[in-house]
Structure formats: structure tokens, C-alpha cells
Amino acid sequence: MKVATIREVREIEAAADRSGMSYEQMMLNAGAAASRALRQRWTVDASTRITFLVGTGNNGGDGLVMARSLALSTEADISLYLLEPRSPADENYRAALEAGLPVALATDDDDRLRLKNLLLDADIIVDAVLGIGARLPLRGAAADVLATTGNCLSQRAKYAAERNRDMPAEHSETPPPVRPFVFAVDCPSGIDCDTGEADEHVIAADLTTTFIAAKPGLLTFPAAAFVGDLDLSPIGIPESLPELEGIKAEIVDSKLAACLLPPRPLDSHKGTYGKAMIVAGSPNYIGAISLAGEAAYRAGAGLVTIATAAKLTEIVAGSLREPTWLPLPHTDGAIAEKACQAVVDIVANYDTLLVGCGLGLRQSTSGFLRQLLASGSLPPLILDADALNILSRAHRWWKQLPPESIITPHAGEMARLTGKSAKEINANRWEIAREYSTAWNVALLLKGAHTLIAVPDGRISVIPFKSDALSKAGTGDALAGLIAGLRAQGLGAYDSARLGAYLHAAAGIIAAATVGSSRSVVAGDVLSAVGSAFATLESL
């Protein structure tokens, strides 16, 4: 699944048109694809009432084609509500009329009474008002129609809640009204598909079907909160079209993640799957040691060695049986500067080195990290958490990293590394991830809902999950450990980072379902669900 900006989508459409697929054919294919996507999600039959909100442009045209397709393939009760009259020469509009679809016009509905009646009666609302080229803020009829729609949805939800409270369903003569299913064609109307900005009148969709490629704004907050489930529907443009094939951004979906899995030959041994060393822990963050170490093993690494303060080894080793240990000199429980030599003496025997989980910011530990990076000849490196906070104080720190290093900042850590604000980071995640991956020559994993992974050659991947299940201390340590375990098995920096991020997010979703609520998930639950996340990919 490619991710393309508005400009790139326009270029792909123009190239497809030049190659023989007309714009009209693309619209016909898009409308038919949207119809299929809705029917895959919802049983559409004679009892289904669908209201289409139809804009004046190509998005409205897609909606008209979709409405006609549903009319010809189902017995649903379909109504069209048009923002403005469409030309009689519009073939898709004429086809919808010939299919017998009733039409209401916003220009004849000043008090929006007709719209309200359609919305209050609908099982499904199809948002085909504005497409990817919408300009914010919305004004005029589009803003008014969407605002009216939002108010009606709120009224229906409130009434349903009150009726459920006052009259239990088993005692009511008719079932209480519920919020209709909202289906967005290409994108929810009123979002910026490049930046992720959202107008105040955007309607939250349950399902968004987008065409040709996903758009970065659909995967960036605040707009991502209105997308619901995201479906990409092909419209017949060949993947080999150079303008499409050359797009360097993509979604890591389950099929791609499955292709990234390292092999597991039956005649293997622990050496087959690599050795990971993890330098982690300080007196205030003892749990980070266990989480990162277990995660590396859960990812499939053959051997994991944890290097931490000797004082902490005595505490953790009894409950974490699988790793080997490298007890390090310490200063009041924090790794001492002189501990660097103990790591350097053996780290060349390892396939990857993870540094930073729960490391702390003591002066002695900062000195340890500076010496470690200056030592040279390090294996593939992953820097997380406090390692990044320490480096943010150093001049041109990236010059000391070995090739294909991975860094895993969240927005706050990225702000410290760049000197920008966290707000600015979150508002420009795609651009910043690309820019600094190239500037620092690293694989940069920018954590958050829809985590991004960028590499210096311009490629960038996005993880399709957004869940509060991972909003807990310790889940970042688990992610870093997963990446280390995959890196030890021979995956490159880009692939180990994006597969690790996918597994981490998928495990969070599974953990939420297992414990019953996303709010109750802790980092240990995520680790327990990693096996199930692997199993899902292995079954594909």
C-alpha cells in the first residue's frame, strides 16, 4: 500500500490518463470499488436506508457512481442529497437519475429540514462531499451541510443513550435508534490529505475507502481520528506505472510485514538467530531491563546478553532466566563511565547492540555512552530513550554512529534532538522524519500513533495502527527490544525497525482484546501477545 501526496496522486492520474485509462473510467472504477468496499463491511439489502451527501466535484462524481452501483446490485433505499445542481450533461448524474434515485438539493433546502429527515432515517451515510483537494477552513454549503450532519449524528447518539437508559431494549416495542454507519469516499470531507489538518465540521467515518494510494493526512493526527478503518481500493491503475511504482512511502500492512519475517530453518541452533547485547537500566528504571531483554528473545534472537550495573543484575537476574549477563561497574547503581571497556571487550562478538532503555541521565552514564560511541567498531546499533536524551546534549553526535544505526525517539525526544518543539514535530511528522533521517544518516523510527520509519534514501513506512493500548511506560522498551531481536537475526535497519514496530502495535491490539480494555494494557501484556502477532503473520 503506497502513500502518496495530493500532488503525487494528480501526477499518477495524469500518467494513467496518458496511458489510456481516462479520468471518466477512473471515476467509474472508483465508484464501483467503493460500492464493493461498503458491501464487504455491511449487509446491504432492501431494509437498508442510505443517504449520499454529494459534492460538486470529482468526489461527488465518485459518490454518484457508487450510489448507482448499489442501486443496480441491491434493493437498498438510496437517497441523494446534492450540495448544488449538477449539469444534465453529467453522465454519472444522468445515470443515477435513470436508476430511479431520488434527489434533494441543498439549494432548495434552506432550513435543512429535508437533510435532517434523511439523516435521522439513515442506516448508512456516505460522505462524498469533498475529496483530497479540499481547502480549509470550509465555508458555504459544504460547511453548513457537514455541520448539520454532525449535529444530527450527535442527536441520534444522545437519544439512543437516553432511550437505552430509560427503557431497556427488551421492554421496548422498537429498537432504539443508533448512530448510522458513516462511509467516507476517498477521505472524510474537510481534512487536508497532505498535512492531517481537520476542519471543525469533519464527520468521523467508520470506514474510509481511498483510491490509488493512501494519503499522508489520513495517517496523521488530528485528521486520522476521523478516518475510522482505512481501506485502499484499487481502481485499475497498474502498479507498474512509473509514477505509482516510484512512490517511496508505503504502509506496513500484514502482507508486507509477513514478507519481512526472517526465516526459521528446522535444522537451526541459537547461533542461527544471532546474538543481541542490551545495555540498559538504572536504579529508577529497573523494569526496562527485563522488558527489553524479554522482547529481544520474543522477537526470535538466539542469545541475548544484558549489560547493566552489577547491583541491578542481582535484582533482575532471578526473575529473568533466559539472558546471559554482563555485570558492569556502577556508581550508586548507575552504569559507571569506566564500564565502557567491559562492553567494548566483547561487543564485537554480537550482531547488534541496543543502548538506552532505562539508562538514566547520571553524569557517569553519559560519560559511558560517549566513550562507547568513540570506541569504534560497534555492531549494528540501536539507540533508544535516555541514550537519545544524552546525545541531544552532544555536538554533531550522529557523526559517531556506525552505518545503518537505528534511533527510536518519541516526539519529546525528537524535539530535544532537533531543538524544535514537540508540537512542531507532531505537526510535521512525515517531513521531519524524512529530513532528519537523511541529515543524520540513520534509520529513524518516530514513535506515536501511526509510527513512521524513515531511511536516508527517501523511503518511509507508516504503521497502520492507532491505539491507546501502547500509551504506557515500558512499551517503548519492549519495542526497542523487538527491533534488537530482529536486527540480530540479520534483518537490515529499515526492515527490522518497521517489522518490529508492526509487531509491537499488533501485539498492543491483541493485548487489549485479551485483557478486555485498552486502558488496562501494560507493557508485559504486549510482550505476552507478541507470539500471537507472529502467528497471524506466519499464517498468511
Image (tube, grey):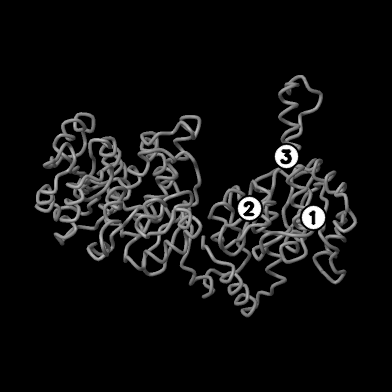
Q: Which residue corresponds to mark 2?
A: 208
Q: Disc 1 on helix, strand or loop?
A: helix
Q: Nearer the viewer, mark 1 or mark 2?
A: 2
Q: Which residue corresponds to mark 3?
A: 154
Q: Given the image, on which type of amino acid does mark 1 rest?
A: Leu
Q: Please tell me how crowded label 1 is: few (under 14), some (14-19), or many (20+) other residues with Cα within 10 Å.
A: few
Pointer 1 and pointer 2: residues touching (CB < 8 Å)?
no
Q: Is residue 269 visible?
A: no
Report, in whole angstroms, how far the alpha carbon at label 3 lies from the one at label 2.
20 Å
Image check: 189 left or right of 300?
right
Measuring from the top left, give residue 369's x and y in whole percent.
Answer: 20, 52
In this view, which residue lies farthest toward the right?
108
Image check: 118 left or right of 25?
right
- Residue at image position (83%, 62%) is 84
Q: Given the image, on which type of amino acid does mark 2 rest?
A: Thr
- Indicate which disc, 3 or 2, sits on the residue closer to the N terminus: 3
- Indicate which disc, 1 or 3, sits on the residue closer to the N terminus: 1
Please, is residue 403 above or below residue 509 in the view? below
Is residue 21 or residue 277 the one in the foreground?
277
Q: Which residue corresponds to mark 1?
A: 72
In this view, which residue lies farthest toward the bottom?
18
